[in-house]
Amino acid sequence: MWQLREGSHPILTDEGGAILSEHTGRWTYLTPTAASAVLSLVSSTDEDQAIVRFAILYGLKREQAAADVRAVAAALIDQGLARTEPSRRRRWWWR
């Protein structure tokens, strides 16, 4: 499942959004449509549910909504702000 990485802090509104990376200290700015895609992704249990929510919100066909949501997700993964795999970080107290 797609999720934001630890240290990525989103600010999402109907008018756009931004994500702060603690790692780089830089902001990534989002258009209103991209912010809606991110909000759909973080509030859904899986990608298909996010795509359906996005399609309903914008009145899109499922294929177009899927392409849009996946494009936003891929761009954030490429920038190191999100991931599709669970964190493999081991805690020092856990063996």
Image (cartoon, rainbow, N blue to C red):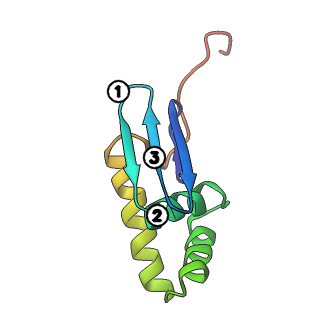
Residue 28: percent from left, percent from top:
37, 44
Which image quadrant is residue 67 in? bottom left
Locate residue 21, reporting x and y percent.
42, 32
Q: Is residue 51 above or below residue 38?
A: below
Amino acid on which the number 2 mark rests in the picture: Pro
**Image position of 61 (left or right of 92):** left
At horizontal 43% and vertical 58% (from top left) the residue drawn is: 73
Which type of secondary structure does the marked residue at label 1 adopt? Answer: loop
Residue 24 against residue 10 in the figure, above or below: above
Q: Which mark is residue 24?
A: 1
Q: Residues within 10 Å of mark 1 (few under 14, many from 20)?
A: few
Residue located beneath label 2 in the image: 32
User: Which of the marked residues, 3 or 2, is nearer the chain's N terminus?
Assistant: 3
Q: Kindly identify the residue that appears in the image at 51 percent across and 64 percent down.
A: 37
Residue pointed to by mark 3: 18
Amino acid tagged 3: Ala
Q: Is residue 36 visible?
A: yes
Q: Earlier in the sequence, mark 1 or mark 3?
A: 3
Give me the residue at 31% from left, 47% from top: 78
Crowding at label 2, few (<14), some or many (≥20) Cα neighbours within 10 Å?
Answer: some
